[in-house]
Amino acid sequence: MKIIVTGKNINVSEKIQTAIEKKFDKFGKYFADDVKANVVMHPEKAKVKMEATIVARNTIFRAENVSQDIFDCIDIVADKLAKQISKYKDKMIKKNKSNESVRFEMIPEMEEPEDQEKKIVKSKKFRLTPMTAEEAILQMELLQHDFFVFLNVETDSVSVVYTRADGDYGILDTTY
C-alpha cells in the first residue's frame, strides 16, 4: 500500500510523516500494493484536521478528525479506519457464508454486540421531481432533512443535495 501525505497550509515534518507511515503501514498487509492511502492535513481555526481515504476496488474507507495535537489525530483516524475495515470484513464473511478466508483476515475483530447490528427498517418510494440544486436545497430545508434526492434539470441526472458537517451544502451527481 502506498501512503500519500499532503499538507494544505501546513508543514508536514519528517516526524509527522514517520508517525503516519508507522500507523498506516499495518493496513498495507490487508490491501494490494497498488492501493493508495491519501492523508490530507490542514489547519482549522486553532486546531488541525486530518482526513484519510483508502480506495480499494469498489470500497472506500474514510476517516477524519480535528484535534489540537496532530499525533492524537493520527491515532484516532487510524483507529476509525481499523474499525471500518473490521466491520467490512465481518459483512463479507456473513455475505459469503462460507469458511473461506476473506481478503482482510489479519484485521483485529471489532467489539460490537450482535444485537446492535444495523438493518433496513423502512423503505420509501417517491417521484423524482425535476428542479435545480437551489430548489432542492430549499425543499430539503423545508422538510428539515439532512439530504434530498431530485432530478437535476441542469445535468439531467439524479442528484442528492446534503448538509455537510461544516454547515455548508454538498451535491452528489450520478453518471452512467
Image: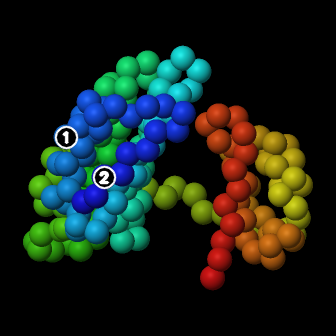
From this view, report whether residue 163 is shown above or below residue 43. below
> Is residue 161 rendered to the left or right of residue 21?
right
Q: Can residue 79 be seen by looking at this rendering?
A: no
Task: Give neighbour class at mark 2: few <14, some 14-19, many 20+ (Cα, 10 Å).
Answer: some
> Is residue 12 rendered to the left or right of residue 169?
left
Residue 60 placement: quadrant = bottom left
In the depicted view, which residue is nearer to us: 117 or 86? 86
Q: Mark 1 vs mark 2: which is more N-terminal?
A: 2
Indicate the position of residue 136 as horizontal and vertical percent values. Answer: 83, 55
From this view, report whether residue 83 is shown above or below residue 128. above
Q: Residue at x 36, y 71 (%)?
A: 57
Indicate the position of residue 21 as horizontal and vertical percent values. Answer: 24, 43
Q: Residue at x 49, y 58 (%)?
A: 120
Indicate the position of residue 159 as horizontal and vertical percent values. Answer: 72, 65
Across the whole image, how many numbered discs are drawn on residues? 2
Q: Which residue matches tag 2?
A: 3
In the depicted view, which residue is nearer to us: 58 or 34? 34
From this view, report whether residue 119 is shown above or below residue 102. above
Label 1 – label 2 distance at C-alpha: 10 Å
Q: Residue at x 19, y 40 (%)?
A: 22
Quadrant containing the C terminus in the rendered view: bottom right
Quadrant containing the N terminus in the rendered view: bottom left
Indicate the position of residue 115 as horizontal and vertical percent values. Answer: 31, 45
Of helix, strand and loop, which one carries label 2? Answer: strand
Residue 151 placement: quadrant = bottom right
Q: Residue at x 38, y 45 (%)?
A: 5
Q: Amino acid at mark 1?
A: Lys
In the depicted view, which residue is nearer to us: 110 or 165? 165
Q: Which residue matches tag 1?
A: 22
